[in-house]
Image (cartoon, rainbow, N blue to C red):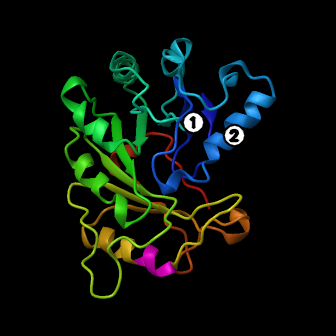
Amino acid sequence: MAQSSIEWTDSTWNPVTGCTKISPGCDHCYAERMARRLQAMGQAKYRDGFAVRTHEACLAEPLEWTKPHVIFVNSMSDLFHKHVPLEFIQRVFATMREADWHIFQVLTKRSGRMAQLGPSIDWPENVWAGVSVENQDYAFRLDHLRRVPAAVRFVSFEPLIGPIACGRGQSPVDLTGIDWVIVGGESGPGARPMAEEWVLALKAAADARRIPFFFKQWGGVNKKAAGRELLGRTWDGMPAEAAGHAAPARA
């Protein structure tokens, strides 16, 4: 387990590493930069850089962590990448089912494959299903997410690089069946700007359905300088299911 600096989780677990770009939100992938750095440092897990690799030796790791954690699964990959076999995905889920004192957050851009494989996966209540949506063109991932038989469904609008049904005269984004909303701007080299009106429209849509809202960051080349405040405060909403776990609460 690695303690995470990601604001909406505690820890990360990477039984899969590596990925390939699938949409504009991937253009400046932080995980790819980090994988290249770890490869240069000689870390065996990243000897193939950012190529998709499964790591059987990592499968049982969460069973060794006795204290309850909120765990982001595959921060360095995508569990539903086409190069990750269904059999390995099922083994990841078997570990998460057994480690029922943790909450696992599975976030993907391969929403279609996640929905397609739904009948082949026994989805435990402690495993949350999430999709990334970076602009209006990828809002269809929400429709896929609604088909996943997870107890908690969440959407990460990050990096938010365009409006999502929030222009003047447009209807708000449909958050039916969604239990948690995260919004964040892109950070690091080449970061694209995020407009406040895009964020506020998503917050209003979440508020209208009483969905917990988490504002991760404004982003930018120096995300720490830009900060996390929206409307003069931070927003760290989490689903009630996180109660009793080491849910993050960062300023």
Which structural element holds mark 2? helix
The one nearer the camera, 84 or 107, is 84
Badge 2 vs badge 1, beta-carbon distance below 8 Å: yes
* Residue depicted at 33% across the width and 41% down the height: 129
Q: Which residues are magenta?
A: 196-200
The one nearer the camera, 148 or 42, is 42
Question: On the image, which quarter does residue 250 sit in?
Answer: bottom right
Identify the main secondary structure in magenta.
helix
* Residue depicted at 37% across the width and 77% down the height: 201
How many C-alpha atoms fall within 10 Å of the one at disc 1: few (<14), some, or many (≥20)?
Answer: many
Q: Is residue 120 above or below residue 192?
A: above
* Residue depicted at 63% across the width and 47% down the height: 30
197 inside magenta stretch: yes
* Farthest residue, direction right: 41
Tell me where residue 119 appears, x and y as whole percent: 18, 28
Q: Is residue 31 above or below residue 98?
A: below
Which structural element holds mark 1? loop
148 inside magenta stretch: no
Q: Amino acid at mark 1?
A: Met
Instruction: Classify the position of the C terminus by image quarter.
Output: bottom right
* Residue depicted at 41% across the width and 35% down the height: 103
Q: Taking 232 as reference, is 93 left or right?
A: left
Q: Is residue 102 above or below residue 33?
A: above
* Farthest residue, direction top: 57
Dot 2 corresponds to which residue? 34
Label 2 – label 1 distance at C-alpha: 8 Å
Tell me where residue 23 appears, x and y as whole percent: 46, 52
Question: On the image, which quarter does residue 36 sit in?
Answer: top right
Tell me where residue 110 appears, x and y as whole percent: 37, 41
Dot 1 corresponds to which residue? 76
Tell me where residue 58 appears, x and y as whole percent: 55, 17
